[in-house]
Amino acid sequence: MWAIACYVFQCDWSVARVSLFEKTNSDPMRVEHLALPGLVLLHPACSGDEDATFTYFHERQELLAASVDIPNVQAHASRYKPKFTVRGLHFQKPPRAQTKVVRVAHGRIFDVVLDIRTGSPTWGQTVALTLDASDWQRLVIPPGFAHGFCTLEPNTEVEFALSERNERSLLGGVSWDDPDLKVAWPCGQSPGLLLEIDRGWQRLQQLDSPFSWDG
């Protein structure tokens, strides 16, 4: 009899928890348009309590209503042991130019996006922000931008959802430490790790950009 009573209690508690999730997650996500036109930061709607939290990472109707379309063709993740690992600044060239959705699964990053659209009123300008695994924010980067980051904690893991498959032959980049960009990297000029592929990118002034501003 006692076992039956406990079972009923647990079921009632579970139903209450599920109902809480369904009710509070009806709030829409917040779409923040950043200083570089086309760049968007998504703030998820979360629900739950101190023991459990729930969110939708992808809600197509809400995104389309905010003029954000994210066709997901490929997704990948990367993990970096050293603090102050620097990646970038990367972009993929046409005809496989990508929209990237960046999220931190573990740790934190100092994230940098550079406008490389010829004729853009914000060409050569950057936006820098911190992405933290704890708040589930996602950065949407359309074609025409170069992207990079610096990890702020050991064992940081970064996830990407992509509108086109990665094609190594179409990879391009701008030097992370180009002085013209005036980026205040947390590591200064001394990354904890810099991969070989990121050592030889050209400066912005040398870049023959495949992207142009369309207004």
Image (cartoon, helix red, strand yellow):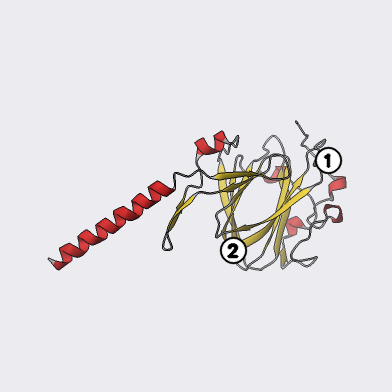
Using the image as rendered, state which of residue 214 and residue 205 is in the foreground.
Answer: 214
Q: Position of residue 168 (x, y in %)?
A: 68, 46
Position of residue 7 relative to residue 27, above or below, is below
Mark 2 crowdedness (10 Å alpha carbons): few <14, some 14-19, many ≥20: some
Q: Give me the residue at 50% from left, 35% from top.
A: 61
Label 1: state its secondary structure: loop
Residue 132 placement: quadrant: bottom right
Residue 197 placement: quadrant: bottom right
Mark pair 1, 2: CA separation: 35 Å
Residue 107 placement: quadrant: bottom right
Using the image as rendered, state which of residue 142 and residue 7 is in the foreground.
Answer: 7
Using the image as rendered, state which of residue 129 and residue 205 is in the foreground.
Answer: 129
The three-letter amino acid code for the residue at tag 1 is Asp
Q: Position of residue 98 (x, y in %)?
A: 65, 40
- Mark 1, mark 2: which one is toward the viewer? 2
Label 2: state its secondary structure: loop
Q: Quadrant of the N terminus?
A: bottom left
Q: Which residue bears the numbered disc 2?
A: 107
The three-letter amino acid code for the residue at tag 2 is Gly
Q: Give me the residue at 75% from left, 56% from top.
A: 198
In the rendered structure, find residue 208 and report the number of the disc placed on it. 1
In the image: residue 63, left or right of residue 168: left
Q: Give me the residue at 83% from left, 40% from top.
A: 208
Mark 1 crowdedness (10 Å alpha carbons): few <14, some 14-19, many ≥20: few
Q: Give me the residue at 72% from left, 40% from top.
A: 37
